[in-house]
Amino acid sequence: MRLRALSWLLFALLLATTTALKFWPTPPIETDLLALLPATERNPAAEQAAASLGRLSGERAVFLIGLPQAVDARNAATILADRLRDGRVFKNCVAKIPSPDPAALLDFYVPYRAGLLASDPHHLPVTRDDFADRLAARLSGPFGGAALPLAEDPFALFDDWLAALPFRQFRLDFEDGWLGVHDADVSWVLVSAELAGSAFDPALQRELQTALTKAEQELQHRWPTVQILRGGAVFHAAAARESAEGEMNVIGIGSLLGIVVLLLLAYRSLTPLALGLLSVGIGLCAAVLTSLAVFGRLHLMTLVFGASLIGEAIDYAIQFFSVRLGAGPDWNSGQGLKLILPGLAVALATSVVGYSVLGLTPFPAVRQIAVFAISGLVAAWLSVVLLLPWWLSRPTKQTPGALLALPAQWLDFWRARINGRTFLLLAGSLLVVAAPGWFRLTADDDVRALIQPTPALIAQEARLRALTGMEAGSQFFLIEGDDAEQVLQHEEALVQRLTAAGITTQGVSRFVPSCLRQRENQALLEASLSAQQAALDDAGFRAEALRTWQGAVGRHQACLTPADWLATPMSIPFHHLWLGATANGQASVLLPAGYRSVDILAATAADLPGVSLVDKPGSVSRLFGEFRRTGGLLLTAATVLVFAVLAWRYGLRGGGAVLLPTLLAQTIALGILGYVGSALNLFHVLALILVLGVGVNYAIFLVEGLRGGPRRQSAALLGVVLSAATTLLSFGLLGLSATPALSGFGTTLAIGISIAVTLSPGALIMATKLPGMDFTKAPCTPSR
Amino acid sequence: MSHTFARLMVLPALLFLTLLRPAAGEPNATPAAGQQLTPLLAQIEQTKVIQAEFVQTKTLQALKHPLRTSGRLVVVRGQGVLWQIDRPYRATYLIATDSVLEIGADGSRRIRKAREVPALAQTGQVFQAIFQGDTRALEAYFEVRIQSGASRWQVDLTPKPMLTRFLKAISARGGRFLDAIDIEEGGGDTTHIEFRNTLLDAPIADADREFFSH
């Protein structure tokens, strides 16, 4: 016993050291919300594109500085940019923008201009009159004049091409080196910044927060009316991290405090408290290390959940303390362990079954929670079994305290008033009461259950979007082809459809038409050359100028290609639109904007070759929904497994009796969720599965504990009450989480487990006729 | 949004600005030269409605003969600029902040919303700025120099380096209102616009009012 205990202690020490080393100097904690989302796309190129777009938005931050006077707004923007640039947070932070160079744009496109036409070929001018009209418009309209001299572009075709380039989808204006926008009485100036590191780096987030607060205070001091709007993934990440850390502290400290108070009250000694916390600590270290070994990084959400695991992990230790308390002066730690070991094993097994079923779902967040919980519980359990018998080998002088009065009365009430038939009657009537609740259940599979942005940030970003016209759509098209040319052709077909549907687009084909399109365009122009010549003659074009134009139209050369375009500096902001080589060939991304619903996008692109709509939030939501609906299957699987474990220990009927209160708890909890109007999602269903694995523990502890004499029974009852209280406290605190998934999870667990605990004496009643399980005799109220 | 990105999205806007050359002379200079504003220029700035006739002569390298168009313009502060060509054919443009309405000789109408063609928003704003005494947008692209005497004034606009390839100089001169604009383009083409019969704050014809309230 001693050897086992000491080696486990040594192992635990090793665990703790390793964990400490892992967390120092930077904890390997993941705060990227996207990391929580499962891979939804069958096509790896789509996942790749979604990831790179996500990364891109993560690297950027924008600010809008608003003041009544444009001059003040510009000064304020300069100060903000200077202050932010000073730190190590941004590698680039710009308020004032150097003069743009339209010449570079011209020089790039001019050689290819015969193949570059803005409108699709069906709308091109054809007749002499068409060309005469265009020429007249260029010559005399208030917008006459053009980027090129008249002889180079008499019909303003190249001008139209330039104007149609999707550079400008924003409402911002270039004003003397500033990008600004004006609403009713505020001048806004844009400051744009590129992060020096990952948006999810906590150190960077903290530095950003400090630098920003300082800069904001300075601005507010000089201009009390200044408004600062911010946008960027980094702010969401920082807010999510802060809120998660806060929750982790509340849940962790709350659970620990609860344990301290309850254990001190119950056992009136520091030793059980210290040993209980030790077992929980070893459990948490093991949970962290196992999760890190499996997943590489630990997600913050797992830690928030992990904090609530404290209340469950302490249960095994409490059972051990109870049996020691129950044994009184006759305590023999080896025998004591033997007494509770089957119960502990069954309890652990049911919990492991419950969490394993969670681990079967394809959601990274849920899987990590499952691995974390299973490893943590197993380690805590082992600590109790290996360590505590050696440490607590001497009997305790305590007697079960006054804490026990109420639960004992409760149990006595059950024994006196309720027999098998009345319990079934009670169960039946509870089900009847709960049933209408089931029919009130609604479902909401929105991905925001997992990712819940701060409302204040959402409001700021909405304002920023309204002012700037920057759209942050989360849907895009993936376009694939055997080679770059085919990708462009597929994309053009899509752009044509979307444009007809009134949806604007940003894609490489808008900057570089397919070679086919370029050739077609040039052929069309060449075909109508005589009509053009006639129109130019009528307008009095000089022969020399005419030759210049004919030369431009007739010049055949290589097509402009995406490779050419990607090599220019002006394409840098759009590089994310070209994915290049993938497993299937080449691929690009087309970003739509200005659509009312995703369905329109899907319908528009339905039958186009090489085009697929990637709607990550939609896919995740659908997956949530799918698993919510198939939750029944998971639940059945979990129930069968848990029942098998129970039947192994208590026989078929005994197992059924132990399981019954928990099954009732699940169905009633579901009814309660319906009555309070919760919209059901995957996480409620998962919680219900866990109610099975965890809630059944209390019936097990009760049935196991009440097999001994009166003193043992009292102590066991105390143990059950303490275990239930700590678990409920932890999951109840989890219910306060701002993340809907966690909060729904915690609340459902707390509701389900409370009912399971309350009804657990029913297990005794139902099992009472079975051999060796007559619990009806000895009253439980502690004898003083 | 990266810095390069910010640069790029304004490029087409700038290119469009260069399309404004035929009308880009203007009778004012507010922020930079605000203190030097002559009473004459200040008065134009105060005016709500300006109506005038124009004759535009373009001398283009590619054409054998100079090109003359004539018509009239109506500027209503805060609403837009009506630019109506009468000769050699009829065409009407109503340039508002958020849209441009084109009415062809045959009465066909085409509205282009700034949202559809974002560069138009810029164009509309600058176009109105020219006639309404708001040089904020212009100073982004030009050095503004004002000379003025008792009854005459002249404004010279020198494009900033990024525009010199397209535009050499713009000058505008006038008295009570704008009299003439001269534009010299990068390629050697020139445009001369003369304004006559200027009416300040006179009632607008019902037909014109309809354009503005379309």
Image: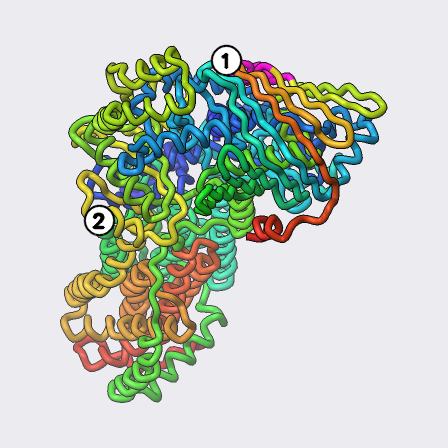
Residue B146 placement (x, y as % from top left): 75, 20
The residue under label 1 is B187
Q: Seen in the image, is A106 located left or right of residue B155?
A: left
| Local SS, label 2 | loop
Residue at image x 20%, y 82%?
A769
Q: Residues within 10 Å of mark 1 (few under 14, many from 20)?
A: some
Q: Say which residue appears at 47% left-offset and 45% top-offset.
A: B111
Say if residue A376 shows up in the picture. Answer: no
Quick check: A708 above or below B154? below
Label 2 neighbourhood size at 10 Å, few (<14), some (14-19), many (20+)? few
What residue is shown at x 64% (from left), y 41% (from top)? B74
Closest to the observer: A595 or A157? A157
The magenta segment: B158-168
- Could you tell whether A171 is left or right of A185 in the image? left
Secondary element under disc 1, as helix, strand or loop, is loop
Name the residue type under label 2: Ala
> Can you give x and y, in whole percent of width and height, for residue B68 in the image?
54, 26
The front one of A342 and A608 is A608
Q: Nearer the viewer, residue A555 or A94?
A: A555
Residue A253 colored magenta? Answer: no
